[in-house]
Structures are given as C-alpha cells and as structure tokens.
Amino acid sequence: MRSRGSATCRFTRVCLVAPIPHPTQKIAMERRSFLAASAAAATVVATQAKSARADEKQRPRRVALIGCGWYGKCDLLQLINIEPVEVVSLCDVDQKLLEECADLIASRQKSGNRPETFASYEELLAKKNVDIVLVDTPDHWHALPMIAAVEAGADVYVQKPTGVDTLESKAMLDAARRTGRVVQVGTQRRSTPHLIDAKKNVVDAGLLGNVAFAEVCCYYHMRANSNPPAIDPPPHLDYEAWTGPAPMRPYTELTHPRKWRAFMEYGNGIVGDMCVHMLDLVRWQLDLGWPKRISSVGGIMVQKDSLANITDTQTATFDFDGLDVVWTHRSWGSAPDPEYPWAAKIYGDKGTLKLSVNKFEFEPRGGGKKLSGEAVIETDKYLTDVTDKEKWALELHVASAIRGHMRDFLNAIDNRSKPVADIQQGHISSASCFMANVAMELGRTLEFDPETHTIVDDEEATKKIKRSYRAPYQHPADTA
C-alpha cells in the first residue's frame, strides 16, 4: 500500500511549480491559514458542545439518592412527579430500606428500571454516571457525601441542616463554590406557595412597616420520652457505617430509623431540626444575612427520665443588629397559640404577620384589610400524595413545597445559577442554630465573625464550633 506522500507524486510530468512567495507574503498567507484553521476548529468544538448539550437535554437527568429512609423517599418521589428523571442509583447502609426503596422507585419511574443499589456512597459516586445526587441521610452524614458528590461532578440537593457543626457546614459551602456545582438545601419554606404569597403581598409590599422583632417557635411533643435498653443492631444495618464520623453510642430502639434526633451526637436537637426552618423563613422574608450575636439558655427541665440527651426546653436569640429573632421550643405542655405550634411571627409597627407550614395571616394594626393564605394541597393533580401519606408519612402540606423546591433546583441547574435555598443561605441558617447550642453550653453570648468564621475574642467558643470526628474519618475542615 502506497503512503499518502508517494501517492501525491505519482504523475510528476503534470505537476506545476508554484512561484516562491515573498517573505512578507508568506507570513500573511501563514497567518490567514492559521486563523482559518482556528476558526474551523472553534466551529467544530462549538458544534460538538452544542450536540453534547442537546444529547443531555434529550436523555433524562440521571439521579442518585443517598439515604433511603423517610425523607429520602419523600424528596425523590416528588422529583419523579415533576420530571421524568432516571433514578440510576440508591445508597443506604440499611439493606432493608435500600431494597424497599429500589422496588418502590422501579414501580414509579417512567422507565420501570430498578436502580442499582450500593452500601457505600463512595462506590456509587465512583461510577461517574449521575447528574444529580440527593443527600437525605441523618444529619451527621450530610457533609461528607455532599462534598464527595460535588467533587464527582454532580449537582446536589441536600437536606437541612448543612452538617452538624459550623466549620463542617462552611466546608460544604466551599466545596460547592470550588467545583461550581449547584447545591439546594432542603429548607423548602422558601418554595412553599402560600409563604411566597405572604412575602410578595405583605412583606415586599411594605405592609408591615418597620420591623424590629420576630418570634420563631416549636411546641410539638417530638422529643423521645422512653428509656430503652441497649440491644444488638439488626442484621440488615451496618451500624459501624451508620455511625460514621459521630461518636459510637450503644444501639437502642431510639437509634434507627428516624429516632436518632433524640441524640446530640447525630444532630443539634430541636434547634438544629426545627429552628433551622423557621429562622431561615424569617431571614428569607426579611432578607437578613448573618446574625451579629447569638445567645441561648435551656436544658432538660421536665422530661428527665428519657434516654434522649437533647433539650426539652430552650430559648435562643439571634441579634441582627436592630432586629431580634427569638426562638422558643418546649416538647411538653401546651402551645401559647394552638393554631401556630410551629411558626414564625413577624412584628411591624403597621401590622403582624403569622406564618406556618399550613397558612399565613396578616393583621394590620388599628384595623384595615386582613390578608391570609393556606397551604396548597394538590391531591387531585398528584394522586400518589394520598398513598404516600399513608405509606411513607408524606405531609400533604409540604408536598407542593417540595415540588416547588425541586423545580427551582432544576431551573438553577439549567441556568447554572443559584437556587432559592443556595448552600450559602443554608449555611447561614444552619450554622446560626449550631452556635445557639454552643452559646447555651458555655452560658454566654457569642459574637460571630463570618469573614474568619471565628467567635470574636473567644478562643474556647471558636474551638467548639467544630466537632471532633471519630477515627478514621476526617473532618472536612481539616482536609480542605
């Protein structure tokens, strides 16, 4: 077989000899050739990129869920409800929950495919075949999988709160910014239809007037009150992996599933669970940033016979320099306002706005037009909301909020923009609640510097805004 070089010289008698160009002519010719070649190459690259984007839009978004318990299913099922995604992977250290979830998703997603199952999120992410990762683990397992997921190139929906300590939460924010990935935190009050209406028609319309005080509260009887003995973990649960970076506790029936919130080792008590939502709601409504000072008092005042080590009574003040947001929770007794047992109340000199997951009410001071709104229930449009309520304890009032939050997340991914509950907003609301517990423990007010992420003139408090990790796990603030 002849080479290309020999083939071009096969008929030498008909070859024409071109005149030798002048040096300046040669340079101009070479420049024009280079520019033409560069333009052609750029066109090819642009065409290939456009084609790749078109291919991505044609195929379903590939989704993975890490944490297949109660809220993992609630979040994932609502994502499936609003877009025909392809759930390709599931991960959980509880084999029973994992297999149940895989069967459920196979019955729900459009393709009918059963997702691949993993006991290790590292193995799941190593496959590099997901576009979106949902992190719905217990709180002590939020940070590491979220950071690993963005580093693997996925956009992430992570449940609140962002981790369990302030510097862990900061590491999550840093990872999202470093990788350029979209991260939506599950503070879905920002996507709750009636609360969006309240912000637009009351707060943004200026009906409150000057605001200098807000109350946030939870009076649910949600704290565990039993004192069960230590037992062996069930065979379908890898308890060592479930505990992960948290301190190892004896396993009891309060540990798993869902009841782990009874213990500070895995979260931040009712402040870290419920205050995050309501503080974030007020911050969003009033466009607030970091609190300047944080103080808190409380403890186990009534329910002293329980194995739970979270407070049953606590008050925290978040001082935004001229506007105080005060949190109160009691897991015993009666709520002072039975219609608003978990709520936010914003006080202005022109009126008061009450906000809950079920409704809002605005009452102007001195009379005038009252405004109100209720949670959007869409069981006529999404028939599975009813069955999911029965099977997976889906809260009907929150279903539309999750769907709205997921739509906002997908829109941010498409536009490579920040979602409404961007990781920075989640970090501020979560870390503020974490520091309230530190303030309560130390018995003093903390002045936080968001630039340095330290407590001003308080070395002891600064050390406490980062927890120790159980070996061999490494805190992400130590590996950044």
Image (spheres, rainbow, N blue to C red):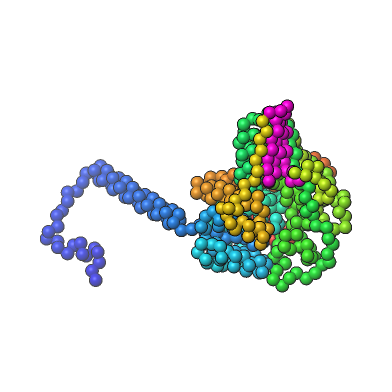
Extreme-front residue of the structure: 380
Q: Is residue 133 above or below residue 188?
A: below
Left or right relative to 182: residue 55: left
Q: Residue reaching furthest left?
A: 13
Q: Is residue 466 in view?
A: no
Task: Return the residue found at the far top.
Answer: 366
Task: Tell me which residue sits at (55%, 57%) in the image.
Answer: 80
In the image, residue 44 sits, relative to residue 244, either above or below, namely above
Q: Residue at x 19, y 48 (%)?
A: 20
Residues in magenta, as a range = 340-368
Give the percent coordinates (x, y) of residue 136.
Answer: 65, 57
Q: Quadrant of the N terminus?
A: bottom left
Q: Nearer the viewer, residue 301 or 5?
A: 301
Q: Nearer the viewer, residue 224 or 300?
A: 224
Chief secondary structure of the magenta portion? strand
Residue appearing at x 73%, y 70% in the figure: 234
